[in-house]
Image: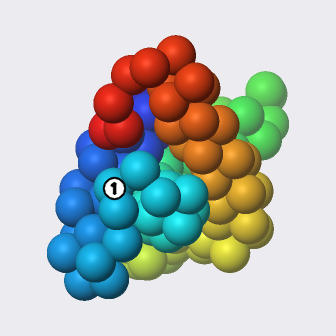
Amino acid sequence: MVLNGTKMGVYDQAKGVVVGLTGLERTSIVTSFLSAATAGFFMTCTVSPFDMIRTRLMNQPADAKIYNNAADCFVKICRNEGPLTLWRGFIPIWSRFAPTTTLQLIIFEQLRSAMGMKAL
């Protein structure tokens, strides 16, 4: 939910900024590429904390629970390691999201165009 909400919301806003700054057409593939790359970056910003919490919960030993739930995990990470720990692993996550998001959104725009629909 956070991932897709960020992807589509940032993509739409980034398209407006790209068009305003560069003068490119809203339907240009370059506009889609730049907007999608921006969306991939911000997706990583919003998803990294959830990914860190999920990973910690999944990797804790079954016989000696460290965290009771996601909220407890969040609080313990922030208290014991600092809030920036939630974004540890940012670059690998971004390197995974950037290409897939860019391809998804460019293909999405091209399919919309092929079906006679307006660009987002």
| Quarter of the image where the N terminus is located | top left
- The residue to which callout 1 is attached is 26
Q: Amino acid at mark 1?
A: Arg
Q: Quadrant of residue 8?
A: top left
Q: Residue at x 32, y 38 (%)?
A: 120
Give above or below for 22 relative to 90. Answer: below
Disc 1 residue crowd, few under 14, some 14–19, many 20+, Cα 10 Å = some
Give above or below for 102 relative to 57. Answer: below
Judge whether residue 92 can be spotted in this image. Answer: yes
Front-lying residue, 30 or 13: 30
Q: Where residue 114 sits: x, y (%)?
A: 57, 24
Give above or below for 67 relative to 36. Answer: above
Judge from the rendering whether residue 34 lies leftward or rightward of residue 120; answer left or right. Answer: right
Q: Where residue 19 sits: x, y (%)?
A: 27, 69
Judge whether residue 2 can be spotted in this image. Answer: no
Q: Residue at x 50, y 30 (%)?
A: 113
Q: Where residue 101 sits: x, y (%)?
A: 62, 48
Give above or below for 119 relative to 34. Answer: above
Front-lying residue, 91 or 68: 91
Q: Quadrant of residue 29?
A: bottom right
Q: Secondary structure at mark 1?
A: loop
Residue at the outermost top position: 115
Q: Quadrant of residue 111?
A: top right
